[in-house]
Amino acid sequence: MPNTLQAYRGSLLHFLADPAFSAQSHVWHEDGLLIVADGKVQAAGDYATLHAALPPGTELHDYSGKLLMPGFIDTHVHYPQTDMIASPAEGLLPWLETYTFPTERQFEDPSHAAGVADFFLDELLRCGTTTAMVYCTVHPQSVDAFFAASEQRGLRMVAGKVMMDRNCPDFLRDTAESSARDTEALIQRWHKRGRALYAITPRFAPTSTEAQLQLAGELASSYPDTYIQTHVSENEAECAWVRELFPNSRSYIDVYDSYGMLRPRAMYGHCIWLNERDRARMAETQSAAAICPTSNLFLGSGLFDFERADQAGVLLSLATDVGGGTSFSMLQTMNEAYKVARLKGSYLPALRMFYLATLGAARSMQLEGTIGNFAVGAEADFIVLDPQATPLLQRRTARGVSLEELLFALALLGDDRAVAATYSAGRQVHARVMT
C-alpha cells in the first residue's frame, strides 16, 4: 500500500488545559514534528525523537522558523453579513434595520447564497479559521448553500437556519411552525453528514414568539446532539426590550432556559449584561459563551467580564461576529479581547487567548478529542503561523525571549498575513501568496 503519512516540521504548540487554571496547560516544542495519516493526527512531539521513527519515503513539509498549531475555531459568525461588514450605525438595533435585514433578504436566491458562502469560507481559511459556528438566514436554501460549500472543502463546520417570526421585516419572517419544519428537515439533511453539524438557531429572543421558542426547545430535546446558537445580553437597549417582551422571565437568559435551551452544545453570543445567577446557570448546564470583542466595541455594546465568568466556571471561547465584528481574523479578535479585559480590570495572557481560540472553543462545543488540539486521533485541522510575516512582526519577534512574548506579538500585531498555510483534515486548503 502507498505511504499515506505526511510529516510537518516547525515549532509546535497545542493545549491540554486552560492556562488560567492549570500550570501544565500546553505542549511546546521549539523544533517539533506533526505526523498526519488519513486526515488525523498520528503523533505530535519533538522532531529529533519522532523523525527517527518515520518510515522511509515519508513526505516531510519543512516549516522551520514557523509555528504549527491547531486551526482557530470561531464560535459565533454570520456568513450572510460578509458584504455589510464595516457598516456605520448608532447601535445594534438601528444597525439591524438599516443594513442587516436588507442584506439578508438577498439569500432567498440560492446562487447569491452560494457565492457569498464561497467567499466567506475562503476568507476564514485565509485567516486560519478551520471551524466556525455560523448563522445563515431565514431561508433554508442559505443553509444548503453554506453546507455544500463547506463539504466541498472538507471542513468541520456548524451552521443553522435563523428562526425569526416577529419584530422583523415581512420579507424575512417565517412562522413558528414553518421554522420548526424547515429546521427539522435541515437537521435530517445535514447533521453529521461528513463533517457538518447542525445548530438550531433562533436569532434572538425578541424576534421569536413564545410559540417559536417552544418549538425550538422541543427540537433541541428531540435532537440532543445538535447545537443551539443564539444571542443574549449583548446590548442594554436590547436587554430592556426583552424585559418588555418577556415580563415573566427572571432575566434574558432565563427566557431561553424556560424553553429548555440551556444545555451542552448551546452557544450564546456576547453574554455581556449577565448577573451572577445567569452565569451560574450557564455553568451548571454547560452552556457556553462566545465572546465577540470587535463587535462589542464596534456597536458600543459593552465589555465582557472575564473575571466574573471565570469565577462562575462558564465555558468560554472567542468569536469574530462578522459583520458586527470588524475582522475575520482570530488574531485581530485576540487583540481586541486583550484590550477589553484590561478595560474591565483583568489581564489575558497570550497563552490564554490562543487556548480560547483552539481547545477552549472545542471544549465549549463538546468537541475535545475531535478538534482543538493535537491529541492522537484528532482531526488534523492545523495552521502555520509566520512570525516574520510583516516587517514589524519580524523585528518584534526577533527580540522575543519567551513563548509568551512570541504569541503576544502574533496576537497584537498579526492578521491574515501571519497565516502561511491552513490545513483541514490533513489537506492544505490555503497557502499564503507572497507579494
Image: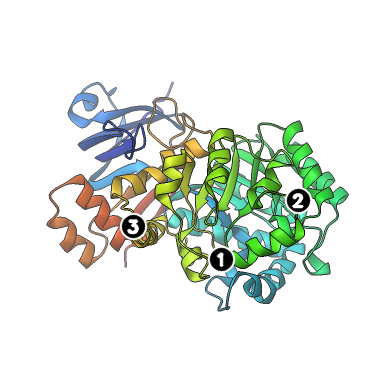
346 and 123: which one is in front?
A: 346
9 and 182: which one is in front?
A: 182
**Viewed as shown, does residue 93 lie left or right of 406?**
right
Disc number at residue 270?
none
Q: Is residue 102 above or below residue 340?
A: below
**Viewed as shown, does residue 251 lie left or right of 185?**
left
Instruction: Give the spatial CA distance, label 1 vs label 2.
Output: 32 Å
Residue occupying image coordinates x 27% and y 31%: 24
Q: What amino acid type should be assigned to the residue bearing mark 2? A: Asn
Instruction: Give the spatial CA distance, label 2 vs label 3.
Output: 34 Å
Instruction: Give the spatial CA distance, label 1 vs label 3.
Output: 27 Å
The percent coordinates of residue 58 (x first, y second) are 31, 29
Q: Is residue 5 above or below residue 231?
A: above
Q: Give the residue pinned by disc 3.
A: 345
**Viewed as shown, does residue 81 lie left or right of 416?**
right
- SS at circle 1: loop
Q: Which mark's residue is nearer the viewer, 1 or 2?
A: 2
Q: Give the residue pinned by disc 1.
A: 323
Q: What amino acid type should be assigned to the residue bearing mark 1? A: Gly
Q: What amino acid type should be assigned to the residue bearing mark 3? A: Gly
Report if residue 175 is visible in the image: yes
Residue occupying image coordinates x 65% and y 34%: 192
Compare marks 2 and 3 and give the one earlier in the sequence: 2
Q: Give the residue pinned by disc 2.
A: 248
45 and 235: which one is in front?
A: 235
